[in-house]
Image (cartoon, grey):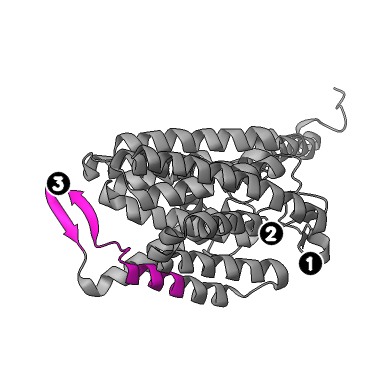
Amino acid sequence: MITIRIMNVTFFILILITAIVLHYILVRNAHRFGLIDTPNERSMHKIKTPRGAGIAIFLSVILIQATFNWEHLISHYLIYSAISMMFLIGLIDDLFDVSPRIKFLFLFFASLLIYLYGVQIDNLGHYFGYSIDLPWIFIFPFTFFAIAGLTNAYNLVDGLDGLAGSIGLIILITFFCIGMANNDTLIITLSSSFIAALISFLLFNWKPAQIFMGDSGSLTIGFVISLLSILSLQYATPTSILFIVAVPLLDTFIVMTRRIQRGESPFKADKNHLHHFLFAVKGEVRFVTILLASLQAAFSIIGFQLLTKDDSLSLVLFGLLFFIFLNLFDQRLKRRRKAKKRKHQDHKQTIPEKLDKSAPSAIPSQLELP
């Protein structure tokens, strides 16, 4: 056990150093490979910035594992092959832009690989004394649905300097604690490896960002988080996992609900995410990043405390959180206040006009002499 911990610390340091070197190289040479993010109408940044930090994140993990921990890599080759697939499609998207359909296809086959390994969701928890077990025919579809949803949810929080890295780091630390508490080598190795890579990324991504994560990073980290979420179901209830990944999930649920309320496609891109709302209120990137990261830390701690608690109460609590967030972070509130203010001003302007029109009839034009 002590030897394993020393090895993990060694791998952690090696991955951290390797990732820092690779990030430095990427920042200096991103323009040569066309890895430059040009601002558009939905961007929060104003200048062209290197992207594709997922290259450093992924390669630092794989290179160190392949060099010093080859047996681990081979014994879990299906899992690392799936992660490699998500990195590959993310990298292609960073370079050339890929259609959502192609990304979906890669995500499907990556999910199939880990399903063949044995990573699956076959139980939805225990509610009011009853266990909800999925029929075998629904196990892979539901597993794929969960992986696709969470991977894309994490991808959507990548909107401000340091935000995706901070939230991903907190979630991975929580899974690392679960792995340590249950002596699960796979969870420990996966989480600690990407924790080291994300720490190095944040050194270059904290405002003002020198490089962005890109899809090569967000899809890779999102998929790893999804994978760890399912692996942790051996030791945790499904509802406790909802808290551990709460901020990306709540953000996605709220945004999709708003789009449906407006009669739009739930998959339409917009600027109505939590970080957009908070930035519009405060106007400071660091404040928004720290606030959302703190919220994620609070949720992760709650989730860790609920690992073996009753699913019924935990689900009710998560539902209440969704209701609170849905009504608290409502972009329409500001527009409604403005509309109400305009309506009030228009109403005040119409009153003198009505009085002016009635004035001639109220005052005689001539005085009659007796």
Q: Earlier in the sequence, mark 3 or mark 1?
A: 1
**Element assignment for label 3:** loop
- Which numbered circle lies on residue 33? 1
Q: Position of residue 52 (x, y in %)?
A: 69, 59
Looking at the picture, which amino acid does disc 1 mark? Answer: Phe
Q: Is residue 29 magenta?
A: no
Report the Cα–Cα distance between label 3 and label 1: 56 Å
Q: Residue at x 52, y 60 (%)?
A: 66
Label 1 near label 3: C-beta < 8 Å? no
Q: CA distance from mark 2 to mark 1?
A: 10 Å
Q: Which residue is mark 2?
A: 52
Q: Amino acid at mark 2?
A: Gly
Q: Earlier in the sequence, mark 2 or mark 3?
A: 2
Residue 340 in view of the camera: no
In the rendered structure, the answer to whether residue 304 lies left or right of residue 245 reads left
Do tag 2 and tag 1 residues touch (Cβ < 8 Å)? Answer: yes
**Horizontal and vertical percent position of residue 113:** 40, 72
From the image, state whether disc 3 or disc 1 is nearer to you.
1
Residue type, mark 3 in image: Phe
Quarter holding the N terminus? top left
Q: What residue is shown at x 64% (from left), y 53% (from top)?
A: 271
Q: Is residue 114 left or right of residue 362?
A: left
Residue visible at 32% across and 71% down? 140
Determine the image quadrant of residue 5. top left
Q: Badge 3 is on which residue?
A: 128
In what quadrant of the picture does the C terminus appear? top right
Upstream in sequence: badge 2 or badge 1: 1
Crowding at dot 3, Cα within 10 Å, few <14 / some 14-19 / many 20+, comes out as few
Q: Quick one: SS at disc 1?
A: helix
Residue 38 point in image, percent of width and height: 79, 60
**Stretch of the chain drawn in magenta:** 108-133
